[in-house]
Image (spheres, coloured by chain):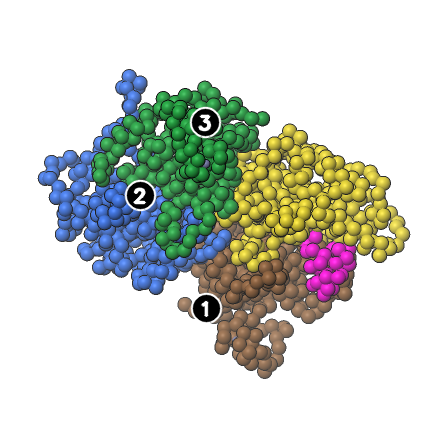
Chain colours: A green, B blue, C yellow, D brown
């Protein structure tokens, strides 16, 4: 049963007669057509990156996404300056993307099933995780725990946000702690890994799904491929750190093309039902 | 801590002072996990193997007794010379290192032994084989496991606390740092390569990331800085170990008196609270959280800390950072 | 079951009858886990990967709905032709297969889903790489985990139940066997090689090990034998699957009504009781356990069962074993 | 601090002037000398196999071992006959070894610490595990659980006893079930793997120690080396399935020479203390 997945019109949508070149096959694609095919190249299947709003439109039942905590914004705890001051980088990212930070979370329904949905946005500073992203993932998990609804997190990130230093690193601990509580309580978590999911995001919540799903061809890894190649001095395996590589090595349950994602998610959620709050596990301690 | 009026900071001197900490933290003669335990612990018994793939010499685990308290220890282990360092992969664990650690964490919980972890790594090994065997999964799982352990966890940053490879064994009820230890989200060289587009800018990156023990304490990431002897731990490893051992024992005595459920709740709260952000919401939408105030407090602390980077709390010392 | 007086057994006919079961159990066209589920289950969703090393095509896992009941399934998977069989390693799992199964077992418990396992393997893969990655550890851990799962576990021996590689996913609250399934501590060929010193003696070994479904039921290792259509499951896979699906659904309904703690206690008792031994102790030392009686009872059952090897309990059939 | 480990005189000890050839180095060793060196070759370190009584003398504090359930004996549930009937094989093994079956268990002290100790005997039908061995391991584990003392099992076995068919196979489940209860209750289990520990014994309780210790050079594996070689058609790795191979692959904590075994065990037991019965783990279920 095919599910219709129309994208809602975007504020920042480009003129409909614009052309884009596919990085997969080099084909010139009409933007309007690309939009209709869920931003998947009709010729080679290359999955273009999605903005958070597009991802939400793809996965959530129409009109069900209610954003929460949209007002959270980054500060500059370290007074971090490289070639630019961190506040200036944030301001620039806001202006370019129209987003407040690299993640949005809210309540939604997927195939009629209520969920907590958190979606990352690579367009905002490479989807880097600072305190705001960590907080939103954690708030989503805590909502899932309290409301006993499944948690879905869609990752797209280059890793932790260096400009927030170890405060960004600690978001790995904060998010993993929230997920550990979810697992203990029998509330399901589906991690959807999209291009790219690397560094501290993959090394924390994104790796910990009860079910991990990846989009085809997504780059998913801990260290950069250049670093890995430099370490061994050997040629990297074919398809290194791509979704299919992760699948072959046992870290991803399913590699699912974008057009089948929602149906797959909804189908899995039929099984991944939160355990009733009353059911406690006590150790068989004699 | 009062908000003092301070003279303008000498940026050059600051960078030198910070970089000297980084170099001290990386000093090859600096005592590592097994050397530290060899001094202040007794009955040290290393255990091996992750029960999946291998035994990782870059991460050591086992039992030890600290001031009469039996513990499970887990720590990164660098070598003190080239061959040993190669064997130990310069303290960069593979996934099997973290999986061995997880096995020991579970064992500690099973038998009610407190855990002490020693953090000293440039980061998890970034080699291709480690990617194949799930470096990220191992780190994430270890972090998640530590957040739920129903036994006290004392973590010490002893040298380099590098990124997720450090955090994987650094989720503690209390986080200590040796005075010359550094703790950062990415190595200074890595940060410089990405943001300054040259590893040459490592010093600037080190300053910008506020990676010294004192700054990390001000940020709330580290709870307590443990003084090192003059010249750094490598100058007098025995004294350094003795001071650290005393601090660990003190924390262990404090934590073992607390109910395990209360420990886990407090540990969650500790990490739950870390982060600095504010809201765009109008005041009309309700009382704002004191997050802005916390952030400002941290910035004040850091600003005031600029001339006392990494100053140890517990022990007064004569050595100055700009020396 | 009454102790009937029976005519002497024709050893040759018996061996032929038993061996025909072995051949039927191994028939390449016999429906395997995914084919069976494809017939009697809906919404089958396979999941992949052990989160450590790989995904093993010899052992399949996922979600399925059986007569309206949502379950986690775990099963060996052979191919139905050569290429597929090579890809699936002839249904002989590697350690990552068992580790994937364990991941799914834990998930079933976490979300309160019953488990159904399908057993059909010559044994765990004996290759050198599997030894390196801990085949024995994986099997032992999976067995131990299954004994503690706080959710119903229905196990079906569908084809060959070969040794520890079968048992690793076969610790159930109830163990069903298809009528032509066999279950043994070692393959007939392996047993023959060791005890008869030639694999040629596989038929004798098969007879000696009492590996047919009916004999296993008499031994108490199998609880219930599910009838196959005349000619075996491969002759009419749809009917075979339908009969099995109904039996599984019946067991699931029975077990899901029981409290999980009671299930685990009963599962322990089930395996705790298996074994046949006696004591050398004098009667004076106290009342002897009824172990001897149990053993004798089993032997009586087996003796009486010699002419009805593998007779299915639930469905009367005309086909005879010596046919 | 060296611990004296004298073997008690054995009923079945051989004349003291007998010579044995070392399979490790070919050296001819005087039996009497070999006995003094704990049956370890003084030249190459080869560890000769020990009988159960010798193993108990090595590990238990002198005079502390109290055997339990010694009266359990095998029956012949299948009426199993190959070239010999199973009861005849058992009778022969009894006559040759002086043992009732391939395992003995009892209470003991190790370095003053009370333990449940179960020791296998390879001399009895290749240490094969039938119902009696499975029952003894289980009884030892159940005693450890009830008395809250550590369990030590010393394995030496070719695997499950074929003559008892699936009843032997089910001993894997029975013993693993008992160990799972032990682990849940926080009662420690130390598995000592000696030459050889293979097949169904290694694939059940022997693999599951909180701490796994092996004697140097012990053959430890799931499938026979010939089978493994035949499967791949390639040369097996050096030292395949030996204790040091297992150590390198992460399945054994320590490889300990016989002379250091008791001190190591006693030292570990200082840490591996059973959790008090009152301490139950309840899930952090919100
Ligand atoms: Zn294309
Ligand atoms: Zn020798």
Q: Nearer the viewer, mark 3 or mark 1?
A: 3
Q: Is residue B210 visible?
A: no
Q: Position of residue C126 (x, y in %)?
A: 60, 57
Mark number displayed over residue B185: 2
Determine the residue positioned at 54% across, 80% down: D27
**Disc 1 packing (10 Å; few <14; some 14–19; many ≥20):** few
Q: Nearer the viewer, mark 2 or mark 3?
A: 3
Residue furthest top in the image: B284
Mark number displayed over residue A99: none
For the residues labelled 1 and 2, say whether their Cβ atoms are less than 8 Å apart: no
Magenta range: C184-209
Mark 2 lies within 8 Å of ligand 1 (Cβ measured): no
Q: Position of residue C92 (x, y in %)?
A: 62, 51
- Quadrant position of residue D71: bottom right
Chain letter belonging to callout 2: B
Chain letter belonging to callout 1: D
Q: Nearer the viewer, residue C151 or D55?
A: C151
Q: Nearer the viewer, residue D259 or C71?
A: C71
Q: Position of residue D184 (x, y in %)?
A: 52, 45
- The residue singled out by tag 1 in the image is D3
Residue furthest left in the image: B7
**Disc 2 packing (10 Å; few <14; some 14–19; many ≥20):** many
- Note whether A39 is above or below B208 in the view shown: above
Distance between the alpha carbons at the discs numbered 2 and 3: 41 Å
- The residue singled out by tag 3 in the image is A33
Asked whether C303 falls inside the magenta stretch, the response is no
Q: Are marks 1 and 2 on the same chain?
A: no
Q: Would residue B268 appear left or right of B294 to someone viewing this image? A: right
Badge 1 marks a residue whose secondary structure is loop
């Amino acid at each position: 049963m095919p599910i219709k997945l129309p994208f809602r019109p975007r504020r920042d949508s480009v003129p409909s007669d614009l052309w884009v070149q596919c990085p997969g096959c080099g084909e010139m694609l009409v933007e309007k057509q690309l939009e209709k095919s869920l931003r998947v190249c009709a010729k080679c299947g290359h999955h273009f990156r999605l903005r958070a709003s597009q991802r939400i439109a793809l996965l959530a039942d129409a009109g069900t996404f209610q954003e929460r905590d949209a007002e959270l914004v980054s500060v500059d705890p370290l007074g971090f300056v490289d070639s630019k001051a961190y506040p200036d980088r944030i301001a620039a990212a806001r202006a370019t993307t129209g987003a407040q930070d690299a993640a949005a979370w809210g309540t939604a329904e997927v195939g009629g099933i209520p969920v907590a949905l958190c979606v990352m946005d690579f367009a905002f500073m490479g989807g880097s995780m600072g305190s705001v992203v960590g907080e939103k993932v954690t708030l989503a998990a805590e909502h899932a725990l309290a409301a006993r609804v499944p948690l879905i997190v869609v990752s797209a990130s280059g890793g932790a946000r260096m400009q927030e230093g170890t405060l960004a690193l600690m978001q790995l601990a904060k998010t993993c702690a929230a997920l550990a509580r979810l697992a203990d309580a029998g509330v399901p978590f589906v991690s959807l890994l999209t291009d790219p999911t690397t560094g501290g995001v993959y090394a924390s919540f994104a790796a910990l799904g009860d079910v991990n799903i990846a989009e085809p061809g997504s780059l998913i890894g801990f260290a950069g491929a250049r670093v890995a190649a430099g370490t061994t001095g050997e040629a990297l395996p074919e398809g290194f750190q791509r979704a299919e590589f992760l699948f072959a090595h046992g870290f991803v349950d399913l590699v699912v093309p974008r057009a089948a994602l929602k149906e797959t998610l909804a189908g899995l959620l039929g099984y991944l039902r939160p355990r009733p709050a009353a059911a406690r596990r006590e150790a068989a301690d004699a | 801590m009062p908000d003092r009026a301070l003279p303008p900071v000498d940026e050059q001197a600051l960078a030198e002072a910070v970089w000297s900490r980084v170099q001290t933290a990386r000093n090859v003669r600096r005592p590592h996990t097994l050397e530290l335990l060899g001094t202040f612990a007794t009955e040290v018994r290393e255990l091996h193997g992750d029960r999946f793939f291998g035994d990782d010499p870059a991460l050591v685990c086992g039992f030890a007794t600290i001031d009469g308290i039996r513990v499970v220890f887990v720590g990164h282990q660098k070598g003190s010379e080239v061959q040993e360092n190669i064997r130990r992969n310069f303290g960069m664990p593979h996934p099997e290192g973290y999986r061995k650690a997880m096995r020991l964490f579970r064992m500690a919980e099973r038998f009610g032994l407190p855990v002490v972890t020693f953090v000293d790594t440039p980061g998890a090994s970034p080699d291709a084989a480690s990617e194949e065997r799930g470096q990220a999964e191992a780190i994430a799982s270890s972090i998640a496991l530590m957040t739920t352990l129903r036994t006290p966890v004392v973590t010490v940053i002893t040298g380099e606390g590098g990124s997720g490879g450090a955090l994987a064994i650094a989720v503690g009820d209390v986080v200590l740092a040796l005075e010359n230890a550094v703790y950062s989200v990415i190595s200074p060289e890595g940060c410089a390569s990405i943001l300054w587009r040259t590893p040459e800018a490592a010093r600037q990156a080190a300053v910008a990331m506020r990676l010294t023990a004192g700054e990390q304490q001000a940020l709330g990431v580290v709870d307590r800085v443990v003084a090192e002897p003059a010249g750094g731990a490598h100058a007098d490893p025995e004294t350094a170990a003795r001071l650290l051992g005393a601090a660990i024992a003190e924390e262990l005595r404090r934590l073992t008196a607390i109910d395990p459920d209360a420990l886990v709740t407090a540990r969650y709260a500790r990490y739950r609270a870390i982060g600095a952000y504010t809201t765009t919401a109008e005041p009309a939408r309700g009382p704002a959280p004191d997050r802005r105030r916390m952030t400002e407090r941290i910035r004040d602390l850091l600003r005031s800390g600029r001339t006392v980077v990494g100053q140890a709390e517990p022990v007064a010392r004569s050595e100055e950072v700009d020396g």
